[in-house]
Amino acid sequence: MHSRPWLITLLVVAGAAVLLHATPPPAAKPLATLESVKCTSNTSGITVEIAASEPVALRSQVITDPDRLILDFPNSQPAVGLRTRLLNQGDLKGYRVARYSPNPPTTRVVIDLNSPQHYQIFPDGKTVIVKLMSDQQQAAAKAHLDNASYTPTPPKPAFNLDVAYKNGRLSVVADHVSLAQILNEVHRQTGTDISVPPGAAQEQIVVSIPPLPLREALVSLLNGSRFNFVMVDSDREPGMLKSVVLTYRGAAGISQPAIPTPEPPVADTPPEPEPEPPPMQMETQPEIPAQPQEGAGQQGPPPDSPPPQ
């Protein structure tokens, strides 16, 4: 039996054509109708409220000479009887409405003004609200908002400092706490005199030192700071820390401990006579010769025609 591949191909192509024609076209977006335009003018500015049958998109532009605000609404049409109104309310002359483009269908609303205006647009479902203000009105509104607004004082950051001293060991946990606060707490718990320079109050640090001998804990705390420090032992109790003296280390220095070692006691022996200085000899210096110095308006369109730009 002989096959007929051309027949199978023809049937497949015909079936595809049937399926293609059977697919329904996508549903068109419903055409919105601009139903009304309401304009109000007062001392705070001009408000234009445009209501439509469906939520609408909006394109806006400002044109001068003469001053006017143009609003284009794609995929829309004007309602019957919605055309042009002359108002003459303050800076608002009036508005004009007409079909701007049949394909795609676009409706244009022109708001005629007597002077340039700042504008803001607030879409609200099926309604679009346009707020227009002059320079003076905008400045007055901003001043009113500034006076009426209340800015609460930001809360102070939580004080996070934990200093513990027990059995000769010191631990410090601090989160964005000044070095002066830490050292004052160390002095309160250990009794060690610590001279705190004024700059230590501005140095905020984050540190976590586990329980260490007092001297080692202070070295860990102060190493890397802006201060050199001297640790002084007690005269009555050798090995016990008496005081810590902090000094600025300068821009190029590195903070390091400087622990003074006590000098050996001096015996009560008569002082040795000082040797007499040798006689001074006068030496004559040869004279150095001086070196030489080196040198020195139209009518509106018919109701069904688009409004002018």
Image (cartoon, helix red, strand yellow):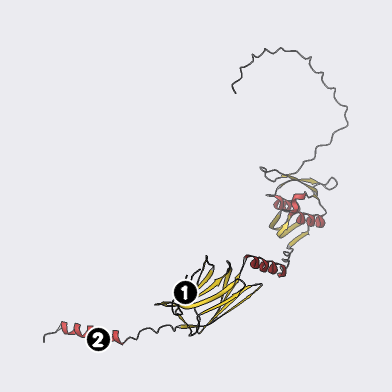
Residue of label 1: 307
SS label for mark 1: loop
Is residue 292 shown left or right of residue 106? right
Rendering quarter of residue 150: bottom right
Q: Is residue 128 above or below residue 268?
A: below
Disc 2 marks a residue whose amino acid type is: Gly
Which disc, if any, is residue 15?
2
Q: Quadrant of the N terminus?
A: bottom left
Disc 1 marks a residue whose amino acid type is: Pro
Marks 1 and 2, how far apart at CA: 52 Å
Observer-nearest of 47 and 264: 47
Which label's residue is closer to the chain start, 1 or 2? 2
> What residue sits 53% from the left and 70% below the top?
69
Q: Position of residue 25 (x, y in %)?
A: 35, 84
Is residue 192 shown left or right of residue 55? right
Q: Position of residue 13 (x, y in %)?
A: 23, 83
> What residue sits 69% from the left and 66% below the top?
143
